[in-house]
Amino acid sequence: MNGTDKMQTQMHEGRVDWVDYAKGFCIVFVVMMHSVLGVEAAAGQNGWMHHVVEFARPFRMPDFFMISGLFLANVIDRDWRVYLDRKVVHFFYFYVLWTAIQFAFKAPGIAAEGGMAQVVHMYLLSFIDPFGTLWFIYLLPIFFVFIKLTKRVPWPVLWLIGAAMEISHLETGWMIPDEFAARFVYVYTGYIAARYIFAVTAWAQARPQLGMAALVIWGVVNGVMVKAGVAALPFYSLALGLVGAAAVATVASLLAMHDVFKPLRYCGRNSIVIYLAFFLPMAASRAILLKTHVITDIGTISVLVTAAGVIGALLIFWAVRNTPLKFLFERPALFWLTPKKVKQPEPVLTLQPAE
């Protein structure tokens, strides 16, 4: 069975294990980035985890966006009502809800500095310029709608436009145009190159030793580019982002071969839960660890805060999933444009819980 055939088999058998591992890998690294930088900013010094965050910078978000586009071809031809319900309203619901929750925690601090007028201003602004950590689920629906609207445009044209936008390193000061320019090429690559990405992961699983050797080479090159300070430069960032995304897919495919890494798969299956709620336990654990001085090593504190962010978010999810508060992580039927179907195994693995 070749890579493409294996891809097709996996896609009809339900969820693809390595995709969940890749999502788990990425969400942990996203939490790690926010945790490490937050701890270091509060402490006024860097720790050894800073090097890990810098190593992951070239591929952390490119891989997340690439995976978000990986199964888009399966749903791109749905009628607009269903498509908008699954790909726009779904994310908009969580964005509006969790923006309100984040503001409830941050409003007192904002009001203390700029008064209630500043709170209202920032809240209203969040609907055109995403607030805090929630920009990812604000931007995804924009990509999904844009790709459906332009699906008849020859893919080389759109890919080259996406590559040019990424290389431009656009900086307008507004989140949406800047991040759209920086990330579109990765979502679109996942959409148009899915069969090749699956072929790479199938190759790695069939030849794990060679896959590991390729990962070592990639790791060395990525590390050298980061250390040299060129990873964020035009052209370098695009190349390292694309290759890094493929590398994470390869890592995930190898991890999926061993049951010991199943907790990472669980994180991937519930990546939206972690993404939405990690800021609460992250902020709380950071404050406690830095104020108590029980642990003084900044790198160790960063690791503990990362773990608290991931595990704490899951604990919140477990605490509410069978209660009336489950609306925090599950969109109620009231907010569906089309009837909610009985859950069936299907490989629609964007950053969202099973529909």
Image (tube, rainbow, N blue to C red):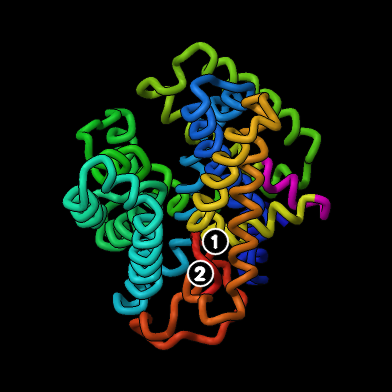
Tell me if 108 is positioned left or right of 10 in this view: left
- Asked if disc 2 and disc 1 are in contact, CB closer than 8 Å, the reply is yes
| Percent position of residue 191, x then y | 44, 54
Q: Is residue 328 above or below residue 204?
A: below
Name the element at disc 1.
helix
How crowded pointer 2 is (Cα within 10 Å; few <14, some 14-19, many 20+) is rated as: many
The amino acid at mark 1 is Val
Q: CA distance from mark 2 to mark 1?
A: 6 Å
- Corner quadrant of residue 292: top right
Is 233 included in the stretch rendered in magenta?
no
**Residue at figure coordinates x 80%, y 35% from the top left:** 209
- Mark yes or no: residue 50 visible: yes
On the question of residue 218 being in view, the answer is no
Residue corresponding to mark 2: 329
Q: Which residues are magenta?
A: 251-260
At label 1, counting other C-alpha atoms closer than 10 Å, the crowd grade (few under 14, some 14-19, many 20 or more) is many
Q: Is residue 245 above or below residue 315?
A: above
- Which residue is painted at 36% across and 69% down in the image? 93
Q: Please name the residue that numbered disc 1 is placed on.
A: 273
Q: Where residue 240 sits in the image (x, y, percent)?
A: 49, 28
The spot of residue 344 in percent (x, y) is 59, 80
Image quarter (top left, top right, bottom left or bottom right) of the N terminus = bottom right
Which quadrant holds residue 144? bottom left
Looking at the picture, tell me which residue is in the foreground, 147 or 103: 103
- Specify the principal SS of the magenta part: helix
Q: In this image, 34 relative to 164: left or right?
A: right
Q: Earlier in the sequence, mark 2 or mark 1?
A: 1
Q: Whole-percent x and y of residue 137?
A: 39, 56
In magenta stretch: residue 254: yes
Q: Residue at x 57, y 80 (%)?
A: 323
* Amino acid type of the residue tagged 2 in the rendering: Phe
